[in-house]
Image (cartoon, rainbow, N blue to C red):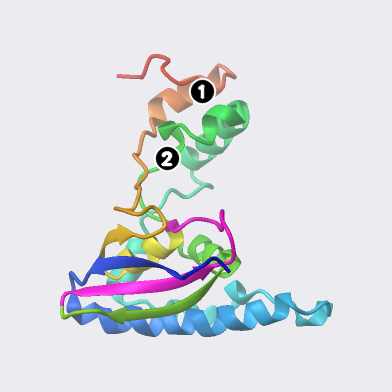
Amino acid sequence: MLDSPFSLEFEISTPARFDALQRFFFALKSEKDQILKSWDSDAEEDQYDPVDEPNWIDYLDEEAIEWFSDFLDLDSPEGITFSKLWELTEPEYRCVDNMFHLPGHWDFESLLESLFNGEYVLVDLRGKTDTTGELIYDPWAGPFGGTEPLVELIEAFGQTVTYDSWHEGPHRRCVVGWDYELAKKLVAEGKGYIPNQEKST
């Protein structure tokens, strides 16, 4: 573990949904605690994948279900184009350029996988005042996978993250730069993306 736990502070923008967020968080925490115990075991039968459990969706309210429905399906024509362009593009560009930051949110399964595989302990999620709350987590070391899935978890329930202690300031949000028309053109030409090349109009 690092010297002290880290936290995400957030504005409780929708108080009616805060209880649902807490219920989901503590269910995730309980499962992740079991995962961490299984990682300490060498027995193959002790390893399991909680993402396959069907009950996680039951923790989502209608608004959260709608939130996680807003993502780019990689099996759609646009998603297939994204995957092809990713393969055609040099890693030094695709891993950092805004072109590969997609609109929409995380899909639910990807969120669960990231939360369960992140190298940190989920500690607590609580209200600090009537209008603010915090999620506390304890990374093993840095890097640990980043705070993006934790932010996604909070904001899927209508709350707004205002401070990220890992970054010692506001959460660093990705700027969406995905250009589907340009991507289709490059893939048709068998070319990868190079930053600063002409954007489509």
Q: Secondary structure at mark 2?
A: loop
Which numbered marker is on residue 38?
Answer: none
Q: Is residue 118 visible?
A: yes
Residues at marks 2 and 1 touching, judged by CB atoms closer than 8 Å: no
Side (left or right) of 187 relative to 62: right
Foreground: 168 or 198?
168
Q: Residue at x 63, y 83 (%)?
A: 34
Image height of 183 relative to 12, above or below: above
Examine the rendering and report whether any part of residue 159 can be seen.
no
The span shown in magenta is: 131-148
Q: Position of residue 122 (x, y in %)?
A: 49, 75
- Between discs 2 and 1, the one toward the N terminus: 2
Residue designated by label 1: 193
Mark 1 crowd level (few <14, some 14–19, many ≥20, 10 Å Cα): many
Left or right relative to 19: residue 87: right
- Residue 101 badge: 2
